[in-house]
Amino acid sequence: GWGVDSRGVATLNLSTVFSPPYVSRILESTVAMAIGTASGFSAAILGKMIVLREEERGANGTGPLLHTIDKRTDFVFDPTQPVGYAIDLVTPELRDRIAVHPLHDSSFCPRLTKNGELRFAFVDGNHRHP
């Protein structure tokens, strides 16, 4: 997890974060949130991982398992594509399980889940890569 080095700078031990207990907790989420959709590739992968874990547990969920929000309606690197277009390309079978909410920012998140329901959020809201 998180720590502080000798200079007082926050550090993150990635081997701890990506250890089986943490990853398992993410995958067992019943509802997850992705802030920053862009193409939707990350949302598709996260959604697929959660569904595979549901299937392992014998669960058969319905409705959105992942909400993804973005301030835009189009993909930042190709305005001819809608935000989240890659979800249908990567995981078309999850179209009804991954809900894309364009024209919203993180303040919209509380409207999408019940109190205590959200256990995992993936924040990737800055898509201004070099």
Image (spheres, rainbow, N blue to C red):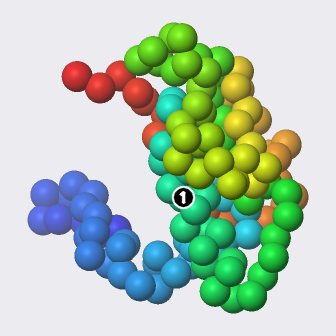
Tag 1 secondary structure = helix
| Figure quadrant of residue 55 | bottom right
Q: Position of residue 45 (x, y in %)?
A: 50, 56
Residue pushed farthest top?
79
Q: Position of residue 104 (x, y in %)?
A: 71, 26
Q: Which residue is mark 1?
A: 46
Residue pushed farthest left?
6
Residue 66 seen in this snapshot: no
Query: Looking at the image, which residue is at 81% across and 70% down?
Result: 61
Query: Looking at the image, which residue is at 60% across and 74% down?
Result: 52
In the rendered structure, which amino acid carries the disc numbered 1? Leu
Relative to 80, say whether 87 is above or below: below
Q: Position of residue 126 (x, y in %)?
A: 43, 29
Report the side of 124 relative to 97 (left or right).
Answer: left
Question: Looking at the rendering, in which quadrant would you find the N terminus?
Answer: bottom left
Residue nearest the viewer, comparing 8 with 61: 61
Relative to 28, say whether 6 is above or below: above
Q: Position of residue 42 (x, y in %)?
A: 48, 47
Query: Looking at the image, which residue is at 41% across and 18% down?
Result: 77
Question: Looking at the rendering, in which quadrant would you find the C terminus?
Answer: top left
